[in-house]
Image (spheres, rainbow, N blue to C red):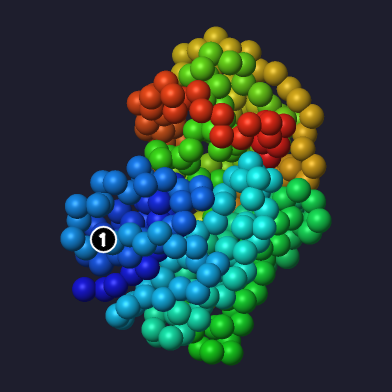
């Protein structure tokens, strides 16, 4: 039985990865310090004899007993609200944390995949974004703690690959959605659905012409698995190239929820990307991967999940006074 460590296991994406690798027959060690993750996301696995959970901060030394075949480093705050509330932790998890896990991969002769992001492209001057594009990032802007941490993580990952011969993989993740997202984490999809469910007007920052490309979580997890099992060590974009403006997306949410809310506009935050669309040519040619779930289908599933949340969860204001920083 393959033994796999997944960091960030109690988060949105991490918990879906836990499920995938358990279904693939792995023994999974889930690790999370729960700073943004939730034990509720992994409670369905607690009775599984092939799953164990460790409450640990990967920014500190990581030690695992026994052999390891794979490491998936997906621990990181993932929303702009988090970047602003915990900027130092955001920097540490993709620097110290990546260094610790790469060292563990070297020690265990394990293959490791690190979760990078479309944010390494910053506010892009190339569209759609190809892996060879170096990006347009402001290192001292409000998003810099996340963007630069991920860029550093890619650099240290390649250093371990070239200098130590560690088997590394780098996935650049574009906007992803699905069940187990935090409803009030500040990202546009849960923000819109949450506002609709609460009977609030939908808030667009900027004029709504900025674009995003949304990938359903099951498609993303499939792409991550295929990349990990491939022999390709350079960064690969994984996302859905179906591009939509934020204004169009707001109208889709209003139609989906059957609500009558209006759309209101506020100032665009600093360094907010104007365009997001992955070029997935490499994923298609190297991994034989492309997304299968349409946005219409994925949104219906996600909406039903959010509708099932309690009134307390629906009205929880995690971001307090940070509403104006809904950037992503």
Q: Considering only vertical position in the picture, is 288 above or below 69?
A: above
Q: Considering only vertical position in the picture, is 118 above or below 232?
A: above
> Which of the pair 70/47 is nearer the observer?
47
Q: Considering only vertical position in the picture, is 132 above or below 212?
A: below
- State the quadrant of the C terminus: top right
Residue bearing the label numbered 1:
51
Residue at image position (44%, 28%) is: 313
Instruction: Give the number of marks.
Output: 1
Q: Is residue 185 left or right of residue 291?
A: right
Report crowding for label 1: few under 14, some 14 to 19, many 20 or more residues within 10 A (C-alpha): some
Q: Can residue 243 be seen in this snapshot?
A: no
The image quarter in which residue 249 lies: top right
Give the percent coordinates (x, y) of residue 257. Answer: 46, 18
Looking at the image, the residue that sits furthest to the top is 260
Give the percent coordinates (x, y) of residue 246. Answer: 64, 31
Q: Is residue 212 left or right of residue 181?
A: right
Give the percent coordinates (x, y) of residue 81. Answer: 63, 41
Q: Can residue 61 be seen in this snapshot?
A: yes
Q: Is residue 130 left or right of residue 256?
A: right
The image quarter in which residue 299 lies: top left
Residue at image position (59%, 78%) is: 158
Residue at image position (53%, 42%) is: 214
- State the quadrant of the N terminus: bottom left
Residue at image position (48%, 38%) is: 182
> Which of the pair 246/197 is nearer the observer?
197
Q: What element carries label 1?
A: strand
> Which of the pair 130/115 is nearer the observer?
115
């Amino acid at each position: 039985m393959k033994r796999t460590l997944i960091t960030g296991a109690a988060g949105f994406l991490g918990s879906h990865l836990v499920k995938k690798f358990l279904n693939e027959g792995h023994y999974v060690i889930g690790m999370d310090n729960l700073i943004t993750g939730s034990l509720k996301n992994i409670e369905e696995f607690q009775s599984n004899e092939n799953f164990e959970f460790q409450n640990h901060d990967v920014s500190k030394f990581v030690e695992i007993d026994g052999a390891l075949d794979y490491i998936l480093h997906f621990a990181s705050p993932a929303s702009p609200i988090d970047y602003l509330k915990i900027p130092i932790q955001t920097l540490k998890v993709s620097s110290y944390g990546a260094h610790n896990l790469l060292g563990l991969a070297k020690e265990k002769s394990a293959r490791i995949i690190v979760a990078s992001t479309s944010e390494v492209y910053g506010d892009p001057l190339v569209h759609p974004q190809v892996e060879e594009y170096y990006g347009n990032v402001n290192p001292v802007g409000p998003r810099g703690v996340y963007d630069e941490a991920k860029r550093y993580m890619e650099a240290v990952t390649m250093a371990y690959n070239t200098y130590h011969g560690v088997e590394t993989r780098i996935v650049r993740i574009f906007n992803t959605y699905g069940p187990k997202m935090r409803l009030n984490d500040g990202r546009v999809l849960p923000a819109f659905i949450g506002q609709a469910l609460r009977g609030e007007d939908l808030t667009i920052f900027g004029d709504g012409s900025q674009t995003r490309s949304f990938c359903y979580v099951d498609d993303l997890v499939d792409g991550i698995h295929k990349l990990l099992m491939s022999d390709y060590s350079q960064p690969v974009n994984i996302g859905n190239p179906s591009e939509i403006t934020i204004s169009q997306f707001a109208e889709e949410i209003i139609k989906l929820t059957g609500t009558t809310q209006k759309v209101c506009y506020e100032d665009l935050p600093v360094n907010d990307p104007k365009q997001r669309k992955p070029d997935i040519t490499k994923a298609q040619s190297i991994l034989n991967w492309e997304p299968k779930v349409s946005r219409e289908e994925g949104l219906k599933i996600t909406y039903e999940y959010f509708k099932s949340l309690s009134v307390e969860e629906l009205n929880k204001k995690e971001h307090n006074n940070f509403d104006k920083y809904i950037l992503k």
